[in-house]
Amino acid sequence: MNNPFSFLTEVRAELTRVNWPTRKLLVRYTVLVIGISIAVAVFLGSLDFLFSFLVENFLLK
């Protein structure tokens, strides 16, 4: 780490060895993450609605 130039050279060499995903794989993973995020949001929203309904109708009356 004493020589920044050699560090950057090593970083560049390391980045050439990285196995980068293809565009098709990147799109597939992105859609998967968005789909799981929406499913979790719907699940948590429905639980929130259910618990709010139960509290309002059975505990606050």
Image (cartoon, rainbow, N blue to C red):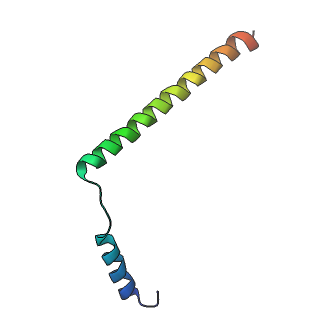
Q: Please tell me which residue is depicted at 75% across the width and 14% down the height of the picture.
A: 59
Q: Please tell me which residue is depicted at 70% across the width and 17% down the height of the picture.
A: 55
Q: Is residue 50 left or right of residue 17?
A: right
In the rendering, at what x and y percent does residue 17 appear?
A: 31, 70
Report if residue 4 is visible in the image. yes
7 up-or-down from 23: above or below: below
In the rendering, at what x and y percent does residue 56 appear?
A: 68, 14
Name the outermost residue toward the left.
23
Report if residue 60 is visible in the image. no
In the rendering, at what x and y percent does residue 22 appear?
A: 25, 53
12 up-or-down from 32: above or below: below
State the residue in front, 19 or 30: 19
Q: Is residue 22 left or right of residue 54?
A: left
Q: Please tell me which residue is depicted at 40% across the width and 86% down the height of the picture.
A: 4
Q: Please tell me which residue is depicted at 73% across the width and 10% down the height of the picture.
A: 58
Q: Is residue 22 left or right of residue 2?
A: left
- Identify the image quadrant of the C terminus: top right
* Total number of numbered discs in the rendering: 0
Name the outermost residue toward the bottom.
2
State the residue in front, 34 or 61: 34
In the rendering, at what x and y percent does residue 57 appear?
A: 69, 10
31 up-or-down from 51: above or below: below
Q: Dividing the picture into quarters, in which one does residue 39 lie? A: top left
